[in-house]
Image (tube, grey):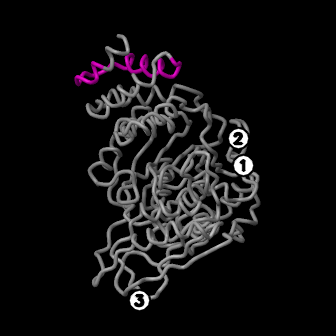
Amino acid sequence: MTPYELIKKKRDGGELTPGEITHFITGYLHGEIPDYQMAAFLMAVYFRGMTKEETTALTFCIRDSGTRADFSRVNGIRADKHSTGGVGDKTTFVVIPIVASLGVKAAKMSGRGLGHTGGTVDKLEAFSGVKTEMGQEEFITAVNKAGACVIGQSGEFAPADKLLYALRDVTATVDSIPLITASIMGKKLAADDDCIVLDVKVGSGAFMKDMESARVLAQSMVRVGKDAGKKIRALITNMDEPLGYAVGNALEVVEAIQTLKGKGPKDVTELSISLAAHILQLAGVGDYDTCETKAREAIISGAALKTFADMIEVQGGSSADVYTENLPKAKFSKTLTATKSGYIVKINAEEVGISAGLLGAGRQKKEDVIFPAAGILLNKKVGDYVEKGEVLATLYAEEEVRFLKVEGRVLSAFTLGNTPSAPRKLILDRVE
């Protein structure tokens, strides 16, 4: 079929064959199909959706569009954890060291910040000297030596996704579950891990705003992962308020280190332990309760902290910076105080994430420079009581003028009431 005929078939609700999808995506990758026809195809998918078979075929096409990793020389079971993006989500720096300290290798390729959500690679680069770009052989050596290594996703992996996402971003077709599934899983499957645990965020600070959408996305990604022969499951977790207290690259890394020392916020600690336990269970370490106990013991014993320090060392940083929490400090800070007394019933995570970005913790344009020390440190969480004049949050930036852009946004992110809101579960569902 011609590109015109394939677009028309999908527009009219027809089901494309794997061969037709591959022909279309490959043609676009090679410059044989123009942007306007791919944009029409994406819009047809947005409105008509895709069957399970079509979604799997699109995912595999993206996976196979570039280099596929070969981690066969990594010694042991290989595992990965992926989050769909949230505000204050620093769990990778807790989960990966936990599982690696217990013998499950963590060969992880991660991304940079997207929109109001932070990026693992940006956070890792807050450490002085740390390398986030490595060739495959160097990466495998690092994983075998430290048990874990986290690098950026190379442009050689799933190049079709980079082209498709750029077009989706400007054609209002980002929030399509088949397209999200193919984008995330295409990149995940281009890596060579045995076990994958997905953290699908839902709420004000997530891309999925409602439970139904989050569940459908989780089911879609798990199904594709199983079709690829992976051991995979997903947790649907609450992102209605920021995770932990720290939002911003260096601030979040410090909070992750504190969690590895057993002094972290309850929500970061509990979610990290649960994610780690699910990875360990998929890797065959034991049943869930046994794995959860082992994950907690890895923090208590200091084994997970040592593994994280080893990982930073093998990636070119200093392990001493982990133990001393030696991360960049901002030149300027400003405290924001409550204008009235009351219980905090809501913190709009998206507003906090956008504000942290405006302070310099994220990018407004792809060429923007990130300031590692910029961000927001919350003093209160949902359910806490605050007196008028008490500090709600502290802003950090390299330029004082940036405070003017976000003071009002951060204050308005806090909703106060006369009675505390009912506590909401952190882990809302599990999808096998």
Give me the C-alpha separation between circle 2 and circle 3.
50 Å
Q: Mark 2 points at which residue?
A: 134
In percent of width and height, residue 270 lies at 46, 67
Give me the C-alpha separation between circle 2 and circle 1.
7 Å
Q: Name the residue under label 3.
A: 387
Element under disc 2: loop
Of mark 2 and mark 3, the one earlier in the sequence is 2
Q: Residue furthest top?
A: 1
Q: In this view, does 232 lie to the left or right of 331?
A: left
For the magenta stretch, what is the residue range?
8-31
In percent of width and height, residue 106 lies at 59, 48
In percent of width and height, residue 192 lies at 56, 36
The residue closer to the viewer here, 3 or 13, is 3
Question: Which quarter of the picture shows residue 332?
Answer: bottom right
| Residue type (three-letter) at the residue carrying disc 3 | Glu
Q: In which quarter of the image is the N terminus?
A: top left
Say which mark, if any, is on residue 131.
1
Identify the residue shown where x is 54% and y is 72%.
Answer: 377
In percent of width and height, residue 371 lies at 64, 60
Number of other residues with Cα within 10 Å of mark 1, as a class: few under 14, some 14 to 19, many 20 or more? some
